[in-house]
Image (cartoon, rainbow, N blue to C red):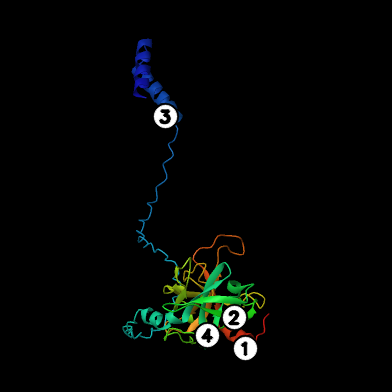
Amino acid sequence: MAAVLISICITLTACGQSTAEIKSLVDERFQVLLAEIPTVTPAPSITPSPTTTPQPTPTVVAFLPTPTPMTILPTPTPITITPIPTATPQPIVNFNQVYSKISASVFKITAGNGHGTGWIIESGLIATNEHVVRGQTTVTVHQVSHEPFKATVIATDSKRDIALLAYNKSVTLDPNAIPLSLGTTTNADLAQPLMALGYSGEAPVNNGIVDLPSANVGVLSLIIDLGPNSRGYTLVMDVPVDPGDSGGPVVNSTGEVVGMTTGVVETSTAGQRVVGTFYALHVDEIKSSLPALKSGLSR
């Protein structure tokens, strides 16, 4: 605005006006210019904001999973450990004494072109397999250290494979050749030791006299029932026997007869090869058949 007034003054002076006129004109122009200046609206007073009260920092709480209720087990009853007593050592079965006691009662039976084994079941009577004497009425009995003698087939049981031979009681026998005791055997005897005596193979004969019978030892594996038309109750054992041992006695550790050798299993019912399995007729079948055989009844 001062610049405008100066400009007016310079202009008026240049025009030759008087000082009073100039002053009046300047005042007039000043008022005009002053009126043209807009009135400044005063800025509203700023109400001061209240001081913010600091908020406490919240404590973050982690929510833990609800625990699974636990079942409190009862206090266990203390276990008293009872020491197991040391087992009393059992003597190993030694069949040597048994063999020495019964071997003189076991014979080689020659029938036709074949042979087998027999043993004294009663005074004057010898038991063997039916298939050993099949088709024969008279057989030759060979013994150790004494002359052979003849025996007659008095009856057979082809179902059980048993034959009963009778000999003259006047023949000379070894003093130890006595009837063998018949025992018994059940499933409770499984895995118990057994011994089989017999004349397997081509046992040498010298003037009708033979050597001692062979002895083979094993255990009772199983007792099976082959049925009334096929030997009935039979011992399954791992006592190795061979052709010629048929009809020989199978004894337990006390020397009692519990079976009679009948054969070897070579194939299963499914046709598979079987090794190490042998059969012996159960002594109960012998006991059952004996009365009829002694009466001369065959079947």
Task: Assess whether mark 1 and mark 3 are in contact (beta carbons under 8 angstroms).
Answer: no
Find out whether the residues at labels 3 and 2 contact each other: C-beta distance under 8 Å: no
Q: Which image quadrant: the C terminus?
A: bottom right
Say which label, 4 or 1, has the lower sequence index.
4
Q: Which residue is mark 4?
A: 121
The numbered disc on residue 34 is: 3
Query: Pointer 2: what residue?
Result: 152
Q: How far apart are the two marked residues, 3 and 1, measured between alpha carbons?
A: 166 Å
Q: Which quadrant of the figure has residue 254?
A: bottom left
Which residue is depicted at the point 43% across and 83% down? 174
Give amino acid for label 2: Thr
Q: Earlier in the sequence, mark 2 or mark 1?
A: 2
Residue 265 seen in the figure: yes
Q: Is residue 61 above or below residue 192?
A: above
Q: Is residue 123 left or right of residue 79?
A: right
Helix, strand or loop status at disc 3: helix
